[in-house]
Amino acid sequence: MLHKFSQWRGTAVTARDGEVGTIEDVYFDDEHRRVRYLVVDAGGWLSQRRVLISPYAVRMGESTEGNIRVDLTRDQVKTSPPVDTQQPVSRLYEQAHADFYRYPYYWAGPLAWGPIAYPALDKNGVPPVPGVPADAPAFDPGASEALEAARRSHLRSCQELLGYQAEALDGKAGRIDDILIDDGDWSVAQFVVDTREWLPGGQRQVPAEALKGIHWSAREVRLDTHQRAVRQGPKAH
């Protein structure tokens, strides 16, 4: 099912034993176009502390439009590694976060979630990674490939992306107005482009596969498609 990022902002997040906070932002990986963390404002009971919650913990089948349920306790959230969301999230922090929750490292494997295709847990709360014991580390930190991956981070803020200029192959196509997220594989599925500043057509959906690159300093999203394709895309609802 697709969800608008704009509608998720401010949504309550509830753990097994009570409310945790509200969604402030969503971090996605611009290499695989997958959501990696919900940024939750836990202010009120954690002194304005923000925490990151992985899609591994989210239970969409138990969630509602105004409440995201997570299979965690408030104590787990409270004692999770602290993060400064005003600074880029380092891979070192991501390692600590994954180790704390016993999640595989999504960057250390051939699939979208590392060794698996979807962020799923079994009935014991263990990622179903074939051939890996539940008490084994997610990967060997001494492996050269893992160390190289640990130096890179591709996390981007959905909130930051809103308002960026959408640049088609043949010129300006609009501005990013929203982002559609698929809760099945947690992919960034569509960008909502407001074309009214440069093109007729209103708000149009552009598939994430058209993403050519994001230039953060120029505040541009570059698309591997033409203005006409954007203008004639499905209307955003």
Image (cartoon, helix red, strand yellow):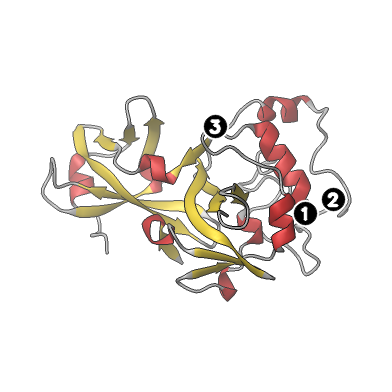
Q: Indicate the secondary structure of the residue bearing disc 1.
A: loop
Residue visible at 69% across and 25% down?
148
- CA–CA distance between discs 2 and 3? 31 Å
Q: Is residue 61 above or below residue 75?
A: below
Indicate which disc residue 88 carries.
3
The mark closer to the camera, 2 or 3, is 3
Residue visible at 24% across and 53% down?
204
Question: How would you rate the neighbour count of disc 1 (Cα within 10 Å): few for under 14, some for 14-19, many for 20 or more?
Answer: some
- CA–CA distance between discs 1 and 3? 29 Å
Q: Is residue 118 at least partly visible in the picture?
A: no
Q: Is residue 103 above or below residue 167?
A: below
- CA–CA distance between discs 1 and 2? 6 Å
Q: Quadrant of residue 222?
A: top left
Q: Is residue 78 at least partly visible in the picture?
A: yes
Q: Is residue 109 left or right of residue 48?
A: right
| Residue tagged 2 | 132
Residue 127, percent across and down?
A: 75, 57
Which amino acid type corresponds to the residue marked 1 in the rendered image? Answer: Val
Quarter of the figure that contains the C terminus: bottom left
